[in-house]
Image (cartoon, rainbow, N blue to C red):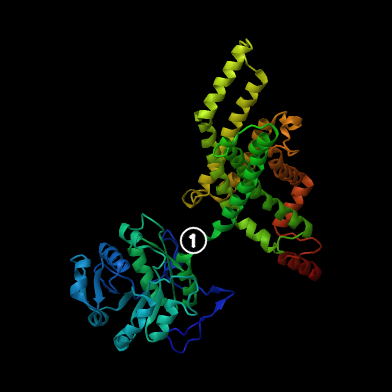
Amino acid sequence: MSQLDPLNPGASETPCRHGLPDMVESDMEKPLLGLGNAKPASSYDLSCGDTVGILGTGDFSRSLAIRLLHSGFKVVIGSRNPRRSSGLFPEEVEVVLQEEAVKRVELLFVAMFRDHYSTLSKFSEELSGKVLVDVSNNLETNLHRQSNAEYLASLFPKCHVVKGFNVVSAWALQSGPKDGNKQVLICSNSPDAKNHVVSIARRMGFIPVDMGALCSAGEIENIPLRLLPLWKIPVILTICLFTFFYCYNFVRGVLHPYLVENKNEFYKMPVKVVNTSIPCVSYVLLSLVYLPGILAAFYQLHYGTKYRRFPDWLDEWLRLRKQIGLASFYCACLHAVYSLCLPMRRSARFQILNDAVKQVKLNVTSSWQEEEVWRMEIYVSLGIMALGALSLLAITSLPSIGNSLNWREFRFIQSKLGFVALLIATLHTLTFGWKRAFDRTHYKFYLPPTYTLTLLLPFIIILAKLVLFLPCVNLSLMRIRRGWEKGQCVTFAHMQELSETSSNV
């Protein structure tokens, strides 16, 4: 939807092209460091001591009033019952009737539920020409056809409605921008009114983000209602992989001894089977982080262009690599903790005692096995190195750390170092398997050991990566990613000019 600019009734509607709001000029176009050609100050630039009004006396209203007060503003609260509400606010905040607050203040935060907007209709004349900042949210995404801000604008067409501060929690307002998210998403059809709210957000210590026209209000209102939207698929994938590997290891490690050898080893289910399954999940997830990049490279090589859109499933997969990588790191950390706890189990202690008794009865003075000792030493060392590399990848994926790196540094860590982590994890798995992959006794119910299943996908990725490293393939891929297209002859402007000049000569 789009609405006419209340400041200019004769202006045309502000459309949203391709689902994105048109960006209007505002103070947010200034350089972040304050350098360059700065725009002249608008009529809404604020100074210390300006008065701001709030309609509503709820928790968010109280937190907003405290934050505004600490930022140097004078705050007037509009309440239906000032006597009852005055004790909820600091003494410096003035609590008056809604009608008086509307008359005294030019900018008002509407901290009310959507259902109560109509109660302000009796103040429509007093609100004419003033700025109303809608801070409300809904209980569900897309609950109404119109966003709350657009609905407020339809009730008060003579006002300048701005959507903002709804993505900031009351806790963040009380604690200041040092806690929680610093960004404040703002949109409006009125550039001057938007600039006014932008200056307020900056004075409060937040980072305003211009989301364009008021038609973006619906998207802004849906943001606080989304619960980890990018984590749904990675979490489901992790649970499915864990379920598969756990059942597989249960059949091999618990059910087979019970049915074939009549051994009761169900005690392994809480720790041993879990610790055998989690590293498999981590290893497969890490492989799935780098597989879509391989597929995307071969896709571009096949079509000979970078301008052909990836399939939707591949595009979504590429977008979820960060979450899948963090899930892999989480499983790797669990594997490390479980492995450290293995010797603490009572079953492990009893097993050691039983082995010692057997050695005494057999008169064995030393059970040292050189090959097994070296295998475990290398296995543990490679595991620590793999976990360290994954830790570095996880840390650099955090916005606060990633923003301190330039693009080349970030790409080197996430791509080059990430592939090294995959190689180390592969060596870690191979060292764990050692010669046991060729031992028939390790194939329970003719099922191969779990680690042999997990090696399939990483081997494919490593071989594909080696193919992409070949000079002829790598050169073609680099040319495509720099704009070259197969089967097309591109003539640049300066080449045309040289051709025309030579023909004239």
Picture residue at 51% right of the left edge, 36% below the top: 337
> Residue 434 vs residue 396: left or right?
right
| Quadrant in which the C terminus appears | bottom right
> Residue 199 vs residue 242: left or right?
left
Give the quarter of the image for residue 303: bottom right
Residue 192: x and y, percent? 39, 77
Give the quarter of the image for residue 419: top right
Picture residue at 34% right of the left edge, 68% below the top: 200
Give the quarter of the image for residue 493: bottom right
Residue 361: x and y, percent? 61, 12
Q: Secondary structure at mark 1?
A: loop
Q: Is residue 364 visible?
A: yes
Picture residue at 58% right of the left edge, 36% below the top: 268
Q: Which residue is mark 1?
A: 227
Nearest the camera: 324 or 101? 324
Residue 330: x and y, percent? 53, 44
Picture residue at 35% right of the left edge, 80% below the top: 116
> Residue 208 vs residue 126: left or right?
right
Nearest the camera: 230 or 392? 230
Q: Amino acid at mark 1?
A: Leu
Residue 300: x and y, percent? 74, 57
Nearest the camera: 268 or 464? 268
* Residue count near mark 1 (Cα–Cα under 10 Å), binned few <14, some 14–19, many ≥20: few
Nearest the camera: 485 or 143? 143
